Each structure stands twice: as C-alpha cells, then as structure tokens.
Image (spheres, grey):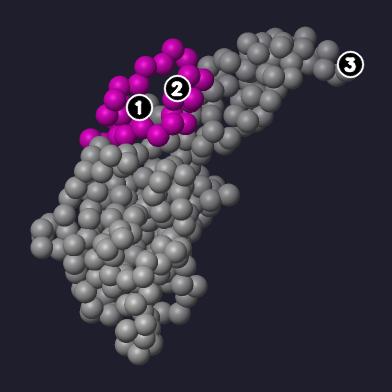
C-alpha cells in the first residue's frame, strides 16, 4: 500500500513514460485498478508507443478515412481490421500486444491461370471482406503464392501464414492427393502437406477417394511427406490452412514467400474459393 501511495505521487508524464514500456493489456489493467492512473494511461505518450513505428504510413492507405482524436482512439480503431491499398489488403493490430497482422487479398496473390475465365472466376461474396474472391472452376495445376516484406511486420515475432478459403459442396479432386505448402524467408524454409477438404466430407468426396483409391496411392508417392493437415474453421465464417511459420527478427529485410501447390497429380479439381493469405502473430 505504501509503495502504491508513493507511486501515485509521481508526475503524470512520468507515470505515462513508465506505462509506455509495458503492453496495452497491462495499461488497461493498471487504469482499472487505480483511478489515479487513468489520465496517465490515456495519454498519447503511452499509446503512441504501442502503435507501429510506420502507423503514419498505414493510416492514409485506409480505403475508409480514419477519424480519431487521440492515439488511444487510433489504436482501438486499428484493432478492428481496416481495408488498405485500394482494397487489396486488410490490416489490424492485436489488442493485447499491438503486433501487426495482414491479409493479402486473392487479387494480391499470384494464382496460376487466374486470368483465364475457363479456369478461375472472380466473384463477389457478401461474407468476404474484399470486393472480389477467386473461385476455381476446374484446373489440373493448382498453384497459389503470396509475398510480403518482413519490414511490414512486427519485429521479434513468430508469424504464421494461413490460406483463407472455402470448399464448396460441389468440390472435386482437391484432396485426391495432398497439396504441398511452404513458407520461404531468408535461410528458413518451412514445408508441409495439407488436404483441401472439409472436416465432414461430402458424399461426393468420399466416393471420389473410394473410386480413385489405387491412383491416390500411386500419386501420393510423388509428394513430399508431411502432416497432411486439413483446414480449420475461423470465427469469420471462412476456413484456413496453415502454410508455415517464421521468425521475424529485429532488423530483418527479407521477402516472405508463402505457397500452396498441387501440381503432381495432373487431375482436374474444382470447387475452391480463395479469399487471401493471412500473416499474423502465432504466439
């Protein structure tokens, strides 16, 4: 109690400086415990320290102009996703840490033959955060790649890359053999395998695997061994599958290449919808 009373005697700007070395979560806890901390905890000194160093570059890129009267209000606004770069990316901050996350839209990805209407359609879905998503009609060569600079991300952070997708009721050929997934940055290469299927398979997918059992066994020998992950449900109504993870160091200046491909089966596949690739802190 005595130490708390002594702490309360500190000048407000001194308290603000001390709080700026903590985290957004710690500041919120402190202000709720002590009313004397409230003013210091709301100061721009504190909340500017939690904003990314390049926030002044990010804010003007918002498709919808951001209005805010304080750095705390700006931080809170950025904790909800904003669409930037002409609708090609989504950006947000983690509430507890202030670390940055991005979603690269399908238009920001390199998707083989995505400009050919015979193979891919670009459609609008009401549940998507972006104006367009890529809908696979039919293809024998599935290759999706995204790139992002490490300087756009928070330093000293482990990131995961996730393909955000949907699998339609009429999907076919997507899980006859596993897709290969990878994240490549600097000297680090993370590789694995994944099956593009829903948790509860449709009857058609089950029949496909039964009918093509022998061919599947032969084709799987061509694919790198891996965990054979399957997509998981997200809170936003989409599904995601992890492509890999990487550590972003203090002064790293690299390009992160994130990829999913199934190019060894040479069979037709369709019924996949791609919204984008999310890069977010993993821990």
Whether residue 32 is situated above or below residue 94 in the rendered picture: above
Q: Residue furthest right?
A: 2
Whether residue 106 is situated above or below residue 25 in the rendered picture: below
Which element type, helix, strand or loop, lies under badge 2? helix
Can you identify the residue that label 1 sits on?
59
Mark 3 nearby-residue class (10 Å; few <14, some 14–19, many ≥20): few
**Residue 184 image offset from top left, x and y in percent:** 39, 63
Residue nearest the viewer, comparing 253 with 105: 105
Which element type, helix, strand or loop, lies under badge 1? helix
Q: Earlier in the sequence, mark 3 or mark 1?
A: 3
Q: Which part of the image, by quadrant, shows the N terminus?
A: top right
Can you identify the residue that label 2 sits on?
74
Which element type, helix, strand or loop, lies under badge 3? helix
Q: Is residue 2 left or right of residue 195?
A: right
Q: Is residue 75 magenta?
A: yes
Mark 3 vs mark 1, CA separation in Å: 43 Å
Q: Is residue 271 left or right of residue 18?
A: left
Is any atom of residue 32 visible in this view?
yes
- Asked if marks 2 and 1 touch (Cβ < 8 Å), the reply is yes
Q: What's the mark number on residue 2?
A: 3
Residue located at (64% from left, 24% from top)? 28
Mark 2 vs mark 3, CA separation in Å: 35 Å
**Residue 49 image offset from top left, x and y in percent:** 54, 27
Q: Earlier in the sequence, mark 2 or mark 3?
A: 3
**Residue 266 image offset from top left, x and y in percent:** 23, 79
Mark 2 vs mark 1, CA separation in Å: 9 Å
- Asked if marks 3 and 1 touch (Cβ < 8 Å), the reply is no
Q: What's the mark number on residue 224?
A: none
Q: Is residue 202 magenta?
A: no
Residue located at (30% from left, 22% from top)? 65
Q: Which residues are magenta?
A: 57-86
């Amino acid at each position: 109690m005595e130490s708390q009373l002594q702490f309360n005697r500190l000048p407000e700007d001194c308290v603000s400086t001390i709080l700026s070395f903590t985290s957004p979560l710690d500041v919120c806890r402190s202000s709720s415990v002590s009313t004397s901390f409230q003013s210091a905890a709301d100061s721009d000194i504190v909340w500017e320290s939690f904003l990314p160093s390049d926030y002044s570059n990010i804010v003007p890129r918002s498709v919808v102009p951001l209005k805010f009267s304080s750095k705390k209000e700006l931080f809170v606004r950025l904790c909800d996703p904003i669409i930037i770069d002409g609708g090609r990316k989504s950006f947000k901050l983690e509430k507890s840490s202030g670390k940055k996350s991005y979603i690269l839209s399908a238009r920001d990805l390199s998707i083989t033959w995505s400009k050919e209407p015979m193979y891919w359609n670009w459609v609008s879905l009401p549940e998507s955060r972006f104006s367009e998503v890529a809908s696979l009609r039919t293809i024998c060569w599935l290759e999706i790649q995204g790139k992002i600079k490490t300087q756009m991300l928070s330093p000293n952070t482990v990131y995961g890359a996730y393909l955000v997708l949907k699998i339609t009721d009429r999907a076919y050929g997507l899980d006859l053999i596993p897709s290969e997934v990878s994240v490549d940055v600097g000297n680090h290469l993370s590789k694995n395998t994944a099956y593009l299927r829903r948790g509860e398979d449709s009857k058609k997918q089950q029949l496909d695997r039964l009918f093509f059992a022998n061919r599947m066994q032969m084709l799987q020998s061509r694919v790198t061994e891996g965990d054979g992950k399957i997509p998981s449900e997200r809170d936003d109504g989409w599904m995601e599958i992890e492509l890999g993870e990487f550590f972003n160091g203090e002064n790293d200046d690299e390009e992160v290449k994130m990829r999913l491909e199934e190019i060894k089966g040479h069979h037709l596949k369709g019924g996949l919808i791609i919204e984008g690739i999310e890069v977010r802190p993993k821990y």
